[in-house]
Image (cartoon, grey):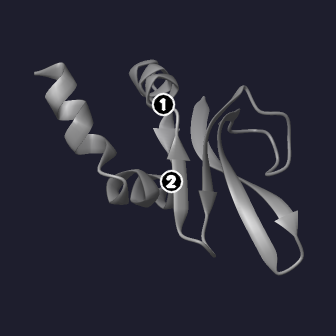
């Protein structure tokens, strides 16, 4: 099973995260299938690869709660409803 989850990067006390599609059995810093976004909680910046995220969601990938919240704040699901209708 594939999940969309956060992968920690950056320095100590200056964490930034990559949003990655990764196998559930892999550890947090493990090998990912594809990088689909970026999240910086300090600067509150988000960069998303919308086509890649849509591809993995259509294939059955499940976002973690944190990634789901990030996508919701970026209004990803509103855009998805518009493109599907």
In the displayed orientation, state which residue is furthest to the left.
85
Residue 15, quarter of the rendered image: bottom right
State the residue position of label 1. Answer: 53
Binning the other alpha carbons within 10 Å of mark 2 as few (below 14), some (14 to 19) or many (20 upward) gives some
Which part of the image, by quadrant, shows the N terminus? top right
Disc 1 and disc 2: Cα gap in Å? 11 Å
In the displayed orientation, state which residue is furthest to the bottom.
13
Asked if the residue at tag 2 contacts the one at tag 1, i.e. Cβ–Cβ closer than 8 Å, the answer is no
Task: Give the residue displayed 33% in from the left and 43% down from the top.
Answer: 76
Instruction: Give percent across and percent down for residue 73.
Output: 35, 60
Instruction: Give percent across and percent down for residue 8.
Output: 78, 58
Q: Is residue 32 above or below residue 52?
A: below
Closer to the camera, 29 or 19? 19
Q: Is residue 37 above or below residue 82?
A: below
Question: Is 25 left or right of 6, judged from the image as shown?
Answer: right
Q: Earlier in the sequence, mark 1 or mark 2?
A: 1
Residue 34: which disc? Answer: none
Task: Give the residue displayed 52% in from the left and 55% down from the top.
Answer: 46
């Amino acid at each position: 099973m594939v999940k969309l989850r956060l992968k920690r990067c950056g320095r100590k006390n200056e964490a930034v995260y990559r949003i990655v599609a990764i196998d559930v059995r892999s550890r947090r810093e493990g090998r990912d299938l594809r990088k689909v976004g970026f999240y910086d909680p300090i600067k509150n910046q988000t960069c998303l690869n919308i086509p890649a995220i849509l591809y993995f969601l259509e294939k059955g990938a499940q976002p973690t709660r944190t990634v789901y919240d990030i996508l919701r704040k970026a209004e990803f699901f509103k855009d998805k409803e518009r493109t599907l209708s």
